[in-house]
Image (spheres, rainbow, N blue to C red):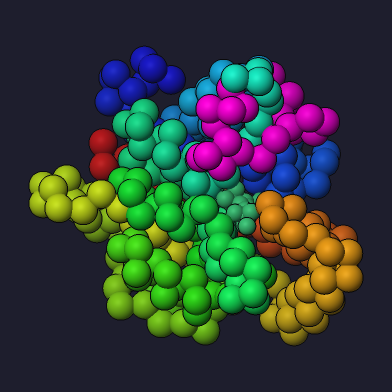
Amino acid sequence: MLAARRAGHPIVALESTIVSHGLPRPDNLRVAREIEQTVRAAGAVPATIGMVAGELVVGLSDAEIERLAAGGEVAKLSVRDLAVAAARGADGATTVAATSAIAASAGIGVFATGGLGGVHREANVTYDESADLVTLARTPIVVVCAGVKSILDVGATLERLETLGVAVAGYGSRRFGGFFVTDSGFDLDWSLDSPEQVAAAMAARRAQGVHDGALVLSNALGVDEQLDPELHDRTLAEGLRLLAREGVTGKAVTPFLLSHFHAATQGRSLAVNVRVILRNADLAARIAVADA
Ligand code: PSU
Ligand code: MN
């Protein structure tokens, strides 16, 4: 990984929370490998980021990915957790927030994930807003995603991204992606229409030197690839009811809702989630190649 960076090879950062907390075993390990293969096939070097025995690793080995995918005592690490977890020698998976921060400080400019965290529904009562947002405000990286997770309050999340100064553009579209579904129902001010155009935005930011925040690139699913929107809405309503009934809060909310989706749709949402991640990994790699 260090050698790849020194040689100026295109690199794509990948997160490990998707693997440990976002996808069910045993599919998660297979998908983690497929994500890396997708990045390689498009001509870039994958760098999956995580913590093994207290050590932050940029570019986990296959054995290390297997260790984080196996479950057990794997913590979900946001930026604030990194130092404490290291002191305890923990194993941990990094979220969008932690992965972006670590990748940017390692000099990596592009990161692929599934859907960003954001403002939860009823955040006006719970104050539950993902640390992904505030971290992206101060982290110079391109995050390729399919919008924010559809379990969230998408409108409120877009407002917060604006306030925080996080750039948002649609890839080839001025509609914001809806993660499991193609369209979140929200318009965007900008689209970027090719890997070269995204790379030009990255170069312009470096040249301008006036903005340190992330560029969120929404790479929405095709209509033929999405989860049936009706099934989506029904499953989400049911998931939110279960969440309230079981009193799930804090960092357990997102994994709980995702796993409810995967169980309640007999794996259909899982297939869509995997599709989202793989096509984001492919686009991120093509952007890294254009930027190199
Ligand atoms: N996207 C996915 N699956 C996931 C996540 C994103 O397709 O599991 C993870 C990311 O790591 C993101 C986290 O940072 O969910 C958000 O969690 P929270 O809402 O607790 O901040
Ligand atoms: Mn939260």
Q: Is residue 21 left or right of residue 288?
A: right
Q: Is residue 77 left or right of residue 195?
A: right
Q: List x then y, in percent, for residue 211.
A: 21, 53
Q: List x then y, in percent, for residue 204.
A: 15, 52
Where, quadrant-wise, is the C terminus in this rendering? top left
Hey, which quadrant is residue 53 in on the image? top right
Q: Is residue 228 left or right of residue 142?
A: right
Say if the magenta span includes residue 90.
no
Which residue is at 37% across, 77% downward? 188
Where, quadrant-wise, is the N terminus in this rendering? top left
Q: List x then y, in percent, for residue 52.
A: 64, 21
Evaluate whether residue 123 shows in this view: yes
- Residue range corresponding to the magenta coloring: 61-86
Which residue is at 44% across, 64% downward? 218
Position of residue 159 relative to residue 194, above or below, is: below
Evaluate whether residue 152 shows in this view: no
Q: Nearer the viewer, residue 122 or 74?
A: 122
Q: From the image, give the main secondary structure of the stretch colored magenta.
A: helix
Q: Nearer the viewer, residue 288 or 145?
A: 145
Hey, which quadrant is residue 258 in on the image? bottom right
Which residue is at 17% across, 45% downward? 206
Which residue is at 65% across, 68% downward? 126
Q: List x then y, in percent, for residue 250.
A: 69, 56
Numbered disc total: 0
Position of residue 268 relative to residue 31, above or below, is: below
Position of residue 142 relative to residue 126, above or below, is: above
Say if the magenta span includes residue 71.
yes
